[in-house]
Structures are given as structure tokens and as C-alpha cells.
Amino acid sequence: MSKLTPYGLCVKTKLIEKGASQTWLAENIRKDTGLYVDTAYLYKIFTGQRTAPKIVASINRILQLDDSTETIR
């Protein structure tokens, strides 16, 4: 199991605060972007194995994170 990046930790914390799951987030990203995203892909983003600027921007919009949050990766 890979370690979460600071960005991944921030997103996971925000999901817990909202009482939402990664599945909920993936569904909302699909609605927001039209791109296919699943929990496995989110995991890769959260652990730094993948960079996906469009997905990260969508996550920031959905969770109302400051755009500077993605720089803490």
C-alpha cells in the first residue's frame, strides 16, 4: 500500500468531514468532467502515482478546496 501524498490526505480528510465516500467523489467527477474516473484511479492520484490536472481541478471544485491545495502534493 502506497502512502498518501499531502494532497491525497487533504482530500480524504475533506471527504470524511463531509461524510462522503470516494465512490461519491468519483461519480461527481464524472458528472463534472464527463471523464471516466473510478476509486482505483483516485487512489493513484492520492498516492502520487498519477497526475491528472483536469481531475484534480474537478476534485477542488467539488470539495471546495483552494486551488493552491494541489500544490501541496
Image (cartoon, rainbow, N blue to C red):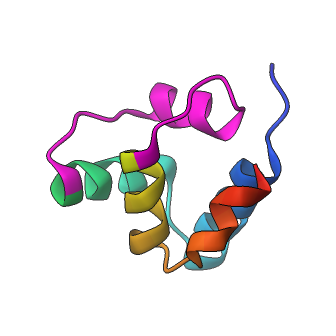
Which quadrant would residue 13 be assigned to in this image? bottom right
Which quadrant would residue 72 be assigned to in this image? bottom right
Name the residue located 51 percent from the left edge and 37 percent from the top edge: 42
Q: Position of residue 64 (x, y in %)?
A: 49, 80
Count the marks: how many?
0
Q: Position of residue 44 (x, y in %)?
A: 59, 27
| Left or right side of 35 for 24 | right
Q: Nearer the viewer, residue 17 or 8?
A: 8
Q: Nearer the viewer, residue 10 or 18?
A: 10
Residue range (magenta): 33-53
Name the residue located 28 percent from the left edge and 58 percent from the top edge: 28
One can see residue 23 in this view: no
Name the residue located 20 percent from the left edge and 52 percent from the top edge: 33
| Left or right side of 46 for 73 | right
In the image, residue 39 lies in the stretch drawn in magenta: yes
In the image, residue 26 lies in the stretch drawn in magenta: no
Q: Establish if 33 lies above or below 18.
A: above
Q: Nearer the viewer, residue 72 or 29?
A: 72
| Left or right side of 51 for 36 | left
Which quadrant would residue 24 be assigned to in this image? bottom left
Name the residue located 58 percent from the left edge and 35 percent from the top edge: 45
Q: Position of residue 43 (x, y in %)?
A: 59, 32
One can see residue 26 in this view: yes
